[in-house]
Amino acid sequence: MNISLNAIRYFITAARYENFSRAANELYTAQPNLSKRIAELEHTTGVRLFHRVGKQVRLTEAGRLLSQEWSEALDKIDQSLLAAQALQQERDNVLSLGVLEGVNVSSMVPQQLRSFQEEHPDILLRLERCSMHKLWQEFGAGRLDMIVTSEVSGITPPLPASMVRRIMSTCRGVIAINARDPMAQHDTVTLPMLRDESFIALSQEETPQGFRTLQEVCRRAGFEPRIIREAASIETLLLYVEAGIGISVISENNRIVSDPNVRLIPVDDLYFDDVIYWRAEPLRPAVRAAVALLP
């Protein structure tokens, strides 16, 4: 019988909440993907894990037993893995920083990194650009010490007590729109003006929180966004815009758009925060040194 640790982790999270929607949110995945993983695990084990009544789920007796046993085993695995990774990183004196693809950090991060390397030449700095899904996956697994991402101002995702969040900078939100679109002639737009537009969004599987944030932003403006495409990356999202298939809402602070076929138009009363995350505990010396240099 071949059962992955990832499948067990999905089940334990779902068992803790007895709510697939909340569990999917914590796991940064889409609810249909979580349901599929649970169904595959039930098929592999031959054990019915949940009673399903409408949209409600409850653990079976067998599911509750496996949840308790596997949770203890997984905690032990996680603790030993984190201890081993911490030992390795302490020995190597490494600081790993992940940055969300598309976020322009030229005005905030390089200066801090140069200062960091000058003050701590013995610490090896590792940098990586990541998609949203990979960024949180690597951070959650302990392979990234700190991450820089972008979030709509005023809509803060659920933050576990083990994480620290700090806003590095704030910039305007913009729509990315094909230059030939009549609306591209505007200098600024308001969200209600986009009511009848076709939206391109990052996929729910890639970034469930980002997908829901787009919906919430539009709903606050009094309409439901008509999302016609879901893209796996920001580059793909902007390729749809370049082709004139739809528009997208992104941060003005991006390093990708340089195509004359795509215009960025500021949106009134919409702002994005560039945010850095790190773990509160254990705070390794390399991370503590980096945090001390943050503005």
Image: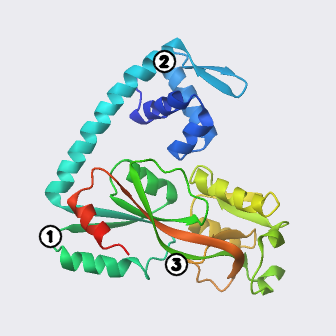
Circle 1 residue: 122
Bin the neighbour count of mark 2 within 10 Å (Cα to Cα): few under 14, some 14-19, many 20 and up.
some
Q: Position of residue 33 (x, y in %)?
A: 59, 39
Q: CA distance from mark 2 to mark 3?
A: 48 Å
Q: Mark 3: which secondary structure?
A: loop
Q: Position of residue 39 (x, y in %)?
A: 57, 26
Which amino acid is tagged 3? Arg
Q: Does label 1 or label 3 sit earlier along the sequence?
A: 1
**Left/right of residue 66 with respect to residue 26 in the rendered view:** left
Q: CA distance from mark 1 to mark 3?
A: 31 Å
- For image coordinates 48% across by 18% down, the residue present is 64
In the image shown, does 201 or 110 lie closer to the viewer? 110
In the image shown, does 18 or 247 lie closer to the viewer? 18
Which amino acid is tagged 2? Arg
Q: Position of residue 221 (x, y in %)?
A: 79, 64
Q: Does label 1 or label 2 sit earlier along the sequence?
A: 2
Which amino acid is tagged 1? Asp
- For image coordinates 48% across by 77% down, the residue present is 104
Compared with 109, 24 (above or below) is: above
* Residue 226 image-quadrant placement: bottom right
- The quadrant of the picture occupied by the C terminus is bottom left
Q: Does label 2 or label 3 sit earlier along the sequence?
A: 2
Q: Nearer the viewer, mark 1 or mark 3?
A: 1
Q: Are marks 1 and 2 in contact (CB under 8 Å)?
A: no
**Left/right of residue 203 with respect to residue 95 in the rendered view:** right
Q: Nearer the viewer, mark 2 or mark 3?
A: 2
Tag of residue 255: 3
**Left/right of residue 95 with respect to residue 260 in the rendered view:** left
Q: CA distance from mark 1 to mark 2?
A: 49 Å
Circle 2 residue: 64
